[in-house]
Amino acid sequence: MHLNVLTYLMIYLAAMVLVVPLAKRFGLGVVLGYLLAGIALGPAGLAVASNTDDIKLLAELGVVLMLFSIGLELDAKKLWAMRHRVFLFGSLQVLVCAVGIAVATFLLGLSYALSVFIGLALALSSTAVAIQLMKDRNLMGTHTGQSVFGALLLQDMVAIPLLIGVSLIAPSADTAEFKALPALAAVVAVVLTGRYLIGYLLHWVAHHGSRELFVGLALLLVIGVMELMTAVGVSAGLGAFIAGVLLASSEFRHQLEADLEPFKGLFLGLFFITIGASINMQLLREEWQLISLLLLLFVGLKLLLLYGVACVLKIAGPERFSYAVLLGQGSEFAFVLAALATAGALLTGTEGAMLNLLIALSIAVSPLLMKLQDAWAARQQKQQPVQNTDVQSSDSPVIIAGFGRYGQILGRLLLSNGIVPTVLDHDSDTIQTMTKFGFKVYYGDASRMDVLEAAGAAEAKVLVIAVDDVQAINAIVSSAKQHFPHLTLMARAKDVAHMYQLRQLGVEHIERELFEASLRQGRDVLSVLGMGHYEAKELADRFRAANYQLLDKMQLVREQQDEKNYIQLLKQSREELQRQLERESRDAPQRYQGLSSATKQRENSKE
Amino acid sequence: MISLLYAHPYAHHARLEQMMLNAVQHWPGLELRELYQLYPDFYIDVALEQKMLQHSSAVILHYPMQWGLPPALLVQYLHKVFQYGWAYGKDAAAVPVMSLKGKKLWLVTNAVTSQHELDPCYQQTMFTPLRQLALSCGMEWQQPLMLPELTDAVTATQAAELFRQGLEQLSVASEEHGAPYAS
């Protein structure tokens, strides 16, 4: 049967839709789900993934799109702030891993050159896997996450000289030739167009084109960069990353991100599926003893080396292992390197296949290890409180869950008044800093009963939930309501809808996270426009009161689930507000008459 | 320096009063502070205000009177700034203090209810609490000025003239024996 690209795409999509939700249901995570789908489609399963070059190209596009969207989140300033993490910490990681693995392979009896090659190839990690795992766990912003990301960026840069090196040592026909001058020219072209031309083009299309044209342009941009970079032998991902960084300060940033998001997700899924499909099950069956031994050796050694690096990077104890696991797999680059080396007769066919298998398996093992690490961290947390409760004699009356911008302001207010709150957060960097200032900080997920207990929830009076994620906030509320009903809960609400949710969960003290700040600034706008500062304050106060009244009214209707009424009420309240405003502007002279001895009125009548 | 503390919650709407204030506020050494602009949230910078008062030879409180009472923020100001242990009473070392001793206190008000509607007997007693404050803090009480009703530009100019006369008296008097308090 002849299958065209569309048929393949259909099969792959079907596999995704069927297998991934199942994997998620059984707690295996998305990445592992994709890999399993890949194995099912691969030669050992349904064997439909035989001629999949086109799909592989799409899969690669997924990785490129991912790096592009990461670039979009990092403008030049943020990137500059990361330079130590990238160049210093990243080089350290690559160097340590490369030397360690090379020595090990040399001891296994391989030749000197081959050992160096394998060491370098296996020192790299999979950007796609690591970033997906971090995103799943919301780790990107933490010290660990940033260090991992820095290392991944450097690896992308290191991959270029590696590819050149291999093609120099073992020249072969299908070597993607690296041409220094064109490569430099290409990067400069990307920088220049990204900096000057693309902005105009985006503007132009946004104003004169339609919605889908903008999506088309975004895709064109990424695919264009990818093609250009591949043509001159530079990592396409790196090129896309640079393009992303250049557009990070553009006003279309969010639009681009949102438009490319579904493509990124799907193609990245394809990428993981192709890795799953490339696992050579036959070879695995034949040589399973040797391969599992090598896998154990490789992953074990890499984790060990990375753990050491994490210690040097001053990553907090419980997170060292996640740093190691996140970077502890083979890289998608290594596939390319292995293919090149095989073509150039540096490796024999079997060795190449073996290396491929090893990398693919290490990628498959990664999400599993991450799961293990989660479980281990959870156990650690359970043990930790025992030591801590021994030390503490007086528990704090206040627990703050989440110590970002919101929680910090609150916590500082308390601390400056002699109340030392207990703080729960999941970023080790925050924790280290805050401990210095005298906060009692725990590392952990506040929705877990044991973590709350460790933080002294049984003795505390107030639990402030200052996390920024709606799901997480609700989870913490539910858990606290169930296990510690005596606690007064105070929660941060994302918006009105979330506020209603929290009210329904029984939280009494709710603050919409942006409401007070916006109101305060609105008040300043009134002041700047020439209104008295106090008068502006009064108007803001009145607005707040009216807003709360309206919210109460709406809640009643909402609870009755009366949609028609709800919409009508919304309309009514808008009209009421309008009437009120009209009345106020009409009444202004009378309102102030009392305090300016009727002067205003007379003045008005004169005018 | 003379501190003119002006307490009117909606000063921007009292245009004729603004007119009058504009006419007097360039008086040499006069420092106008609009309390409702400075402290709309009623959180008063007590240390700063005390410093300012200490550098003044006279303090003028200018406010619209309602039910014979000053606006809420001025009351808050008097409670917070004219503290025990600073303006009156004893300090930490049990030494009597009067940080504002010898400074003049002058009230300038305009009654919300027009003057003739007020019970004359009440007019007499209206300033009693503030007079007591001046006495307790060792301040020199000046005859308060009740501004006439401001109805147009002419009355505003007249009011400004009255205000100026009062300021002149304050300055003359402070030159006479106010040397240690002059800034």
Image: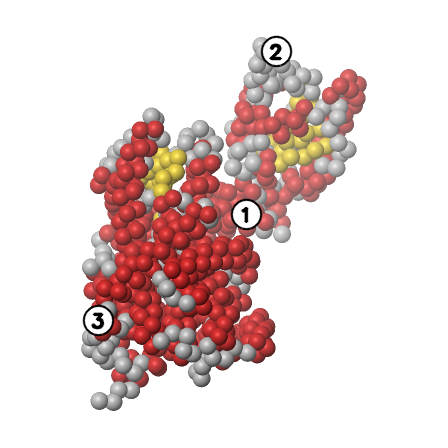
Q: Position of residue B165 (x, y in %)?
A: 75, 29
Q: CA distance from mark 2 to mark 1?
A: 43 Å
Residue A383 position by quadrant: top left
Dot 2 and dot 1 within a common chain: no
In the rendered view of the protein, which quadrant contains the N terminus of chain A?
bottom left
- Mark 2 touches mark 3? (CB < 8 Å): no
Does residue A25 appear in this view? yes
- The disc, 3 or 1, on the residue closer to the chain's N-terminal end is 3
Residue A334 position by quadrant: bottom left
Q: Kindly identify which chain the residue marked by label 3 belongs to.
A: A
Looking at the rendered structure, the kind of residue marked 2 is Pro
Q: Residue at x 61, y 11 (%)?
A: B96
Q: CA distance from mark 3 to mark 1?
A: 75 Å
Looking at the rendered structure, the kind of residue marked 3 is Glu
Camera-side mark, 2 or 3: 3
Q: Secondary structure at mark 2?
A: loop
Q: Residue at x 20, y 64 (%)?
A: A22
Q: Position of residue B115 (x, y in %)?
A: 59, 29
Label 1 environment density (alpha carbons within 10 Å; few <14, some 14–19, many ≥20): some
Q: CA distance from mark 2 to mark 3?
A: 99 Å
The scheme the figure's colours follow is secondary structure
Q: Which residue is mark 3?
A: A286
Camera-side mark, 3 or 1: 3
Q: Kindly identify which chain the residue marked by label 2 belongs to.
A: B
Q: Is residue B167 above or below residue B85?
A: below
Label 2 environment density (alpha carbons within 10 Å; few <14, some 14–19, many ≥20): some
Q: Position of residue B20 (x, y in %)?
A: 69, 38
Q: Position of residue A345 (x, y in %)?
A: 40, 78
- Circle on res. B96: 2
Q: Which residue is mark 1?
A: A524
